[in-house]
Image (cartoon, rainbow, N blue to C red):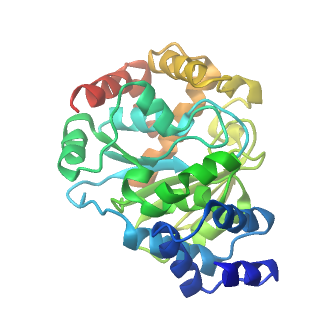
Amino acid sequence: MKEILDKLYNHERLSKSEAKQVLQDIAAEKFNEAHLASFMTVFMMRPISVEELAGFRDALKELAIQLDFSDFNTIDIVGTGGDGKNTFNISTLTSFVVAGTGQKVAKHGNYSLSSQSGSSDMLESFGYQFTNDEHILKHQLEKANICFLHAPKFHPAMKAVGPTRKALALKTFFNILGPLVNPSSPKNHFLGTYNLEVARLYHYILQEENSNYGIIHALDGYDEISLTSAFKIFTKTGEKLISPEDLGMKRIQQSAIFGGNSVSEAATIFKTILDGNGTDSQNNVVLTNAAFALQIVDENKTFETAFEEAKNSLLGLKAKKIVEKLVSIQ
């Protein structure tokens, strides 16, 4: 690690092979916490390169416990986190709403490191038990249209750096990697990023692959469609700038999607929305994200049609029943 750190401190970039090797060594727990913290800190101080990101990703995917969901046309709905906005858990709610429409969702996620509640925190608060057993996860997909893939259960490197990331309590390049390394290799991706540069990196990598994807970055910094500003979306057909007004939506205040000051507060907000009692702003943010996710799977579906399907799922309490079923069939 010392040679790698010396190279990085001299403002040099890692090659794809070097990046891959160092992640493999991290997974093998060859480095102490001081080395890990130093290594991760470098990438907080300068942008990660395409070669570095590709090398890190290749290592994580090769080392991961793989899942074969090829019988299902799944979508992953996940953000990088690290946007510092402390919203309620929009991507997780969106996932349940999408599952409530009948679409299969293989959601990849982790504990929050930069806000009150990540997807794993939320699922755990409902009594969901994390597993990497393919048979159990397939059963959940068949019966509840959704399963949850807790990243440390599948990625040795993420497990190895967990304590260091928690101690740093800052976004690291692992935030960037997470959405790119779903161990089930879903056919569809709806991803959010905390900055535009990361969105372009994702676009560069995913356009080389045979999958459908939408990459979101809100111009005021959210890693999802927030309706607080215009947002960029990158797909295999190019990129667009879309405003809330373009969708017939009202622009909202950031305070309208605040996620609370604790895991329990975040869970209360989550349950309130899931029960069909969310505010118009909260509901519209979730439904807009869900509509775009549904359009990734079916590019011929209009936004209006997808939005109505999502609305029927949330306000018809289908999404709530999905959560209840998922927890009950473990």
Instruction: Indicate whether 55 appears above or below 308.
Output: below
Report x, y in % for residue 95: 43, 39
Rendered location of residue 47, percent (x, y): 75, 69
Q: Where 263 falls versus 61 (above or below)? A: above
Q: Closest to the observer: 88 or 214?
A: 88
The picture quadrant where one finds residue 195 is bottom right
> What is the x, y in percent for residue 151?
44, 52
Which residue is at a point 52% across and 81% down the rendered structure image? 21
Residue 26 vertical position relative to residue 276 in the rendered view, above or below: below
Horizontal side of residue 234 vs 155, given as left or right:
right
Residue 313 spot, x, y in % from top left: 38, 27
Residue 301 seen in this snapshot: no
Task: Tell me what residue is drawn at x 25 percent, y 57 percent.
Answer: 69
In the displayed structure, 250 sits above or below 61; it is above
Pick the front one: 145 or 232: 145
Residue positioned most to the top: 277
Describe residue 28's horizontal placement relative to residue 11 as left or right: left
Q: Quadrant of residue 286?
A: top right
Name the one closer to the observer, 185 or 3: 3
Indicate left or right for 39 with 45 as reference: left
Examine the rendering and report whether any part of residue 152 can be seen: yes
The residue that appears at 52% across and 57% down in the rendered structure is 178
What residue is shown at x 38% (from left), y 73% (from top)?
Answer: 62
The image quadrant where one finds the C terminus is top left
Q: Quadrant of residue 173?
A: bottom right
